Amino acid sequence: MASLSRALRVAAACPRRDLRLRALTSRAGPTTEKSVPYQRTLKEAQGPSAVARGPSRPLPSTANVVVIGGGSLGCQTLYHLAKLGVSGTVLLERERLTSGTTWHTAGLLWQLRPSDVEVELLAHTRRVVSRDLEEETGLHTGWIQNGGLFIASNQQRLDEYKRLMSLGKAYGVESHVLSPAETKALYPLMNVDDLYGTLYVPQDGTMDPAGTCTALSRAAAARGAQVIENCPVSGIRVRTDDFGVRRVAAVETEHGTIQTPCVVNCAGVWAGAVGRMAGVKVPLVAMHHAYVVTERIEGIQNMPNVRDHDASVYLRLQGDALSVGGYETNPIFWEEVSDKFAFGLFDLDWDVFSPHIEGAVNRVPVLEKTGVKSTVCGPESFTPDHKPLMGEAPELRGFYLGCGFNSAGMMLGGGCGQELAHWIVHGRPEKDMYGYDIRRFHPLLTDHRRWIRERSHESYAKNYSVVFPHDEPLAGRNMRTDPLHEELLSQGCVFQERQGWERPGWFTPQGTAPIKKECLACRGAAAVFNMSYFGKFYLVGLDARKAADWLFSADVSRPPGSTVYTCMLNHRGGTESDLTVSRLAPSPQASALAPAFEGDGYYLAVGGAVAQHNWAHISTVLQDQKFRCQLIDGSEDLGMISIQGPASRAILQEVLDADLSNEAFPFSTHKLVRAAGHLVRAMRLSFVGELGWELHVPRPACVPVYQAVMTAGAKHGLVNAGYRAIDSLSIEKGYRHWHADLRSDDSPLEAGLAFTCKLKSAIPFLGREALEKQRAEGLRRRLLCFTVDEKVPMFGLEAIWRNGQVVGHIRRADFGFAIDKTLAYGYIRDPSDGPVSLDFVKSGDYALERMGVTYPARAHLKSPFDPDNKRVKGFY
């Protein structure tokens, strides 16, 4: 067998083709099958095609749920549906279980990721494969707990690992930061000369795909689920109900049709094809993903698995050998996905793979003289943000996704299978799965193949990069720009990207990001924020008031001209959104600022990054409740300019033709006014804790209105400011950010937003029963504000210590320039599992752990900045 060093020399000697061009287009098909590092697979070695023999068992005529795809996610979803007691569940696999992608996966499980939700998902997978399945079935999943070792070749990487260690303490994940010498003692074959340190997680390990899927299917079958192999799906039958809503009706195969209201697309690389059968867009791409298996290595037995992120390589223990793989910068796309592909592999492109060999040989020098036993290059599916695609498709009710796992389907499978099962049964997952929810993507993006391809390529190449707090993508930019984009670009704006939108990050005419300057200008004079990327929806019609009463936690059915900050909840009382809702007066004639409607009408303003999630949530509720009203999207038609600060009234009084006094224009109201001659909707609101107004402006008028504001503000010290300043200003005031310190698994009561809930009224609303139950039983978690006197940057995931015990972790943190302190928000629990009372909060001695170092912290029930809300009322 060729050694790794010889393979590297051969690759170097070969004529170099245009790697960039080849990375973007490859039509190579599957080649002859090669051995993979498992004792068995679930395929049959010989004989005629399994598909040609027909299905492994007769198809039922009906099913409550049909899962398509027998890989990790399909089997985990079926298993968890069965555990929830769902009867009539069927899994259809076109070939044999694990075919396609799962059978050749490396099967690694690392417990620590820079996401609290993912740590929980991974913990559940580990419980399922290391304990539950063997107890239930007597079958071994192939789980081997040999530990995991993350390699740091620079200080930034070591700092990242220390952050993971601190987060792990909040979830009971044992980990240790080791010195180079300690690492050498643990892994004698490793070169540690270039190391800053390592992170060792003793309870990481690996699982066998075939063993795991066999045990999952056996456990599901024991609860009444059916697994049918050799049965390709040929179509998804769809019906349209009396309200015009498309719904799943049946799954079609060559061997019969199964009537079902629910389909789960777990088809991996082939999920796009299954989606097209149903008219559902699935934003993923197929790429070659490879590793090589070495010959025997003396002394490697029982060593931990290794991730050397800076070399973009992993080393998986394989008995007395290693599997070596990673993520390259120039991956090869599988352009024409074959529906005949089952247990095949591609030829390995050594030019593309060679950087992994270099990294592996540097880390474990004995590999230079070790032979290559086999190469494994198979297809994997990847997504634009390197996150899975899950949840109900917005285009088709009853059609769920469980795909696009970016080569992490085995390690995330247990946690995600459980959440997907809850999604199907209860309408929502138990955990906050927004980062995985297909509804995070706007249809403009899911229908744009070039954007999907470019962003997926970048996400793949950056998979092992250091996760910096304010990192921004470079690929697929300028998909959606607002009417002020060019104007702000000329003034030095540096943009951030959120779901295709370009939004102002900060303004830097001289180079360095001047976040402090923008924040203090807002506190001392005024700042103008372009918030045009916000979602702007109209809820109108005969049942609009009924819909608003049910959808929104606050009482928004106030007189026209009122604006209310509110939440939208799910049935568990979790917060699906926070937004402002403005009551409109009915009008028979449409305008640029409101549609024509009869009955009641509301204007909704929601954060642009989560606008599609809001749209989908509202649409689903309207359909489920059969409300007779319309949801209209005006996001592209309107801009949104916000002027905030002590001087905002004086500035806008020169621009608007309205009295802006407290008496004439109170807080939380809106009016139609003229700004520089253009009709706009002005709202007196603040998201930074200052006197201020938002101007909702028809698209053609945005530039002249903005220019008029800047002209009037010149003598008052008005400055442009971006979202980095908003992050600092809002946390300083204690305002929540949805999907940071407020998520779908957090209730408004836990988050300190009880004032947004109409619990004192008798009006029913979605989530009310859950909140009443929570209030009666006491809060098991509570969101607190922490301040730290020492000037240390914090970004979230820091562990919260109370009286020497870890009681939670930080969700969101930033620096408050007005109070000159670091602020952080996080939920705490009582270690005894009792309610978190105010006495419990006040009696604690707190510290925040950042990268392994604890800093004394002070806990607050509300922000120390302007706790009496005088500034938003105009009292300075």
Image (tube, grey):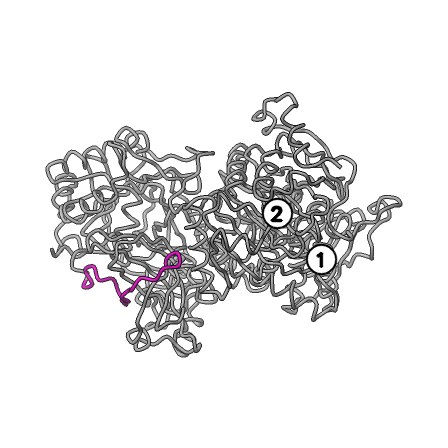
Instruction: Classify residue 780 by image quadrant.
Output: bottom left
Q: Is residue 155 visible?
A: yes
Residue 213: give its label: 1
- Residue sitting nearer the eye, 698 or 159: 159
x and y percent of residue 262 in the render? 64, 56
Residue beneath the point at 65% across and 23% down: 13
Residue 430: give its label: none
x and y percent of residue 810 in the render? 38, 60
Q: Is residue 627 visible?
A: no
Q: Is residue 578 left or right of residue 49?
A: left
Residue beneath the point at 28% across and 74% down: 842
- Residue sitting nearer the eye, 130 or 115: 130
- What span is colored magenta in the figure? 850-868
Q: Amino acid at mark 2?
A: Leu
Of the numbered discs 2 and 1, the one sitting upstream in the chain is 1
Residue beneath the point at 61% across and 47% down: 315
The image quadrant where one finds the C terminus is bottom left
Residue beneath the point at 41% across and 33% down: 478
x and y percent of residue 689 in the render? 22, 54
Residue 315: give its label: 2
